[in-house]
């Protein structure tokens, strides 16, 4: 069962929940080349964790399609240090957005999950069938449980009401609009910022968290947005679907690539007091590939463009000065 289906976005009203985040903003950019109307709600206008206002907003704006990209996200340290926020904020967003979407009769909903829903020691590459086959990685189990609950809500609405709600599981993401907080970000943004600042300061070395041995697969957010639009048009199933790039590297290799992209020539020091997290997270993306989609951005070109976006100040929660 491939889940292949056809849905025409032409003339549809598409609400992107979380349009200011890295994923939501990329989906808005990608939808601009579709013949549809994109709807967004400013955070000051609508708190998506509150179901009643969300329901009223959806009733007033009547989307045909919802992309649920609103989430509390962060890197390994943020996940580890703020378990309540990652669990409760994400559950609140899912309950509110998914229930309200059902209540107003939304035709298609795309829920964004994460590869951390799969067990810490899942068989690699991780197929969708690995879900709930073993214990989760402890640094991000709170976030993972919330994302599993969102996926299960989509399955439950499909089973009980026949709603066409799908779940998409992206691998580790990077790109335009990332969060460059020094402690709370994911590794791509953290290292782009740290290497850039070290270069400006002529620092002899830069700290990289953990042992450098974990393996990660990185996907540019523009590719993910393209996959989301592809899946809105071509996928309908209760089964989640993985979206990866196949670009797998060790954190040590990744850090060296970022140093090259940024132009930093000092040395790397691995800070083993910081956690490694999951030893390996490579998605099996064969199901989306069979449907006809593949990522097209190479890791090096994607990181070069992420660095340029960082220099232009498109990231959030940071200030930066350009190297002279
Ligand atoms: O990106 P990251 O926080 O995500 O860390 P996870 C990936 C790897 O990079 C870990 C190492 O092995 C980190 O120890 N790393 C090295 C660093 N230097 C740094 C640094 O300066 N900052 C960060 N953040 N990492 C996340 C989950 O786990 O994966 C999220 O916590 C989400 O919930 C995301 O699911 C996809 O891959 O370890």
Image: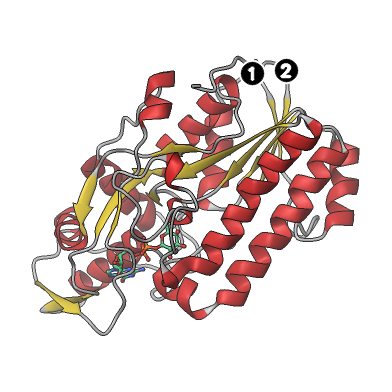
Give the percent coordinates (x, y) of residue 238. Answer: 61, 34
Distance (Cα) linking label 1 and label 2: 6 Å
Q: Which residue is drawn at 30% across and 47% down?
A: 282
Q: How far from the left and from the top, in percent, is residue 42?
A: 73, 52
Image marks 1 and 2: residues in contact by CB distance under 8 Å: yes
- According to the image, label 1 marks what residue? 35
Residue lying farthest to the front in this orientation = 133
Quadrant into which the C terminus falls: bottom left
Q: Tag 1, which secondary structure?
A: loop
Between residues 246 and 202, which one lies in front from this camera angle?
A: 246
Quarter of the figure with residue 106: top right
Position of 142 compared to 93: left or right? left
The disc, 1 or 2, on the residue closer to the chain's N-terminal end is 2
**Quarter where residue 302 is shown:** top left
Position of residue 276 relative to residue 170, above or below, is below
Using the image, tell me which numbered label, if any, was put on residue 64: none
Q: Position of residue 78 (x, y in %)?
A: 47, 74
Residue at 44% x, 64% y: name it.
135
What's the colour scheme? secondary structure
Give the total number of marks visible in the rendering.
2
Q: Does the residue labelled 1 lie within 8 Å of ligand 1?
A: no
Residue 121 found in image quarter = bottom left
Q: Is residue 140 above or below residue 239?
A: below
Specify few, some or many for label 2: CA neighbours under 10 Å numbering under 14, 14-19, or 20 or more. Answer: few
For the question of whether residue 283 can be seen, the reply is yes
Task: Please name the residue shown 49% across and 22% down the image.
Answer: 2
Whether residue 181 can be seen here: no
* Location of residue 244 with respect to 293 vertically, above or below: below
Which label number is shown at residue 11? 2
């Amino acid at each position: 069962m491939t889940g292949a289906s056809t849905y025409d976005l032409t003339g549809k009203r598409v609400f992107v929940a979380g349009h200011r985040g890295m994923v939501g903003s990329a989906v808005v950019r990608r939808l601009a080349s579709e013949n549809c109307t994109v709807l967004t709600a400013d955070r000051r206008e609508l708190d998506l964790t509150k179901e009643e206002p969300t329901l009223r907003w959806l009733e007033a704006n009547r989307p045909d399609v919802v992309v649920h990209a609103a989430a509390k996200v962060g890197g390994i340290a943020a996940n580890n240090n703020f378990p309540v926020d990652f669990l409760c904020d994400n559950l609140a967003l899912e309950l509110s957005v998914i229930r309200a979407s059902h209540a107003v009769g939304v035709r298609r909903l795309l829920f964004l999950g994460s590869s951390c829903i799969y067990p810490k020691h899942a068989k690699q590459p991780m197929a969708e069938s690995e879900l709930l086959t073993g214990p989760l990685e402890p640094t991000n189990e709170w976030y993972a449980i919330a994302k599993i609950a969102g996926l299960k809500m989509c399955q439950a609405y499909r089973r009980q009401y026949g709603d066409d709600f799908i779940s998409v599981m992206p691998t580790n993401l990077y790109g335009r609009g990332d969060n460059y907080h020094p402690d709370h970000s994911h590794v791509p943004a953290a290292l782009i910022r740290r290497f850039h600042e070290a270069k400006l300061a002529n620092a002899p070395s830069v700290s990289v968290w953990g042992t450098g041995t974990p393996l990660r697969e990185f996907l540019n957010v523009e590719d993910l947005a393209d996959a989301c639009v592809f899946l809105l048009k071509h996928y309908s199933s209760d089964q989640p679907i993985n979206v990866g790039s196949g670009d797998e590297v060790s954190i040590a290799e990744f850090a060296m690539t970022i140093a090259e992209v940024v132009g930093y020539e000092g040395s790397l020091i691995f800070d083993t007091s910081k956690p490694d997290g999951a030893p390996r997270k490579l998605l099996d993306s064969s199901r989306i590939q069979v449907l006809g989609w593949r990522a097209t951005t190479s890791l090096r070109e994607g990181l070069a463009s992420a660095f340029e976006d960082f220099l232009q100040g498109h990231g959030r929660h940071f200030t930066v000065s350009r190297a002279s």
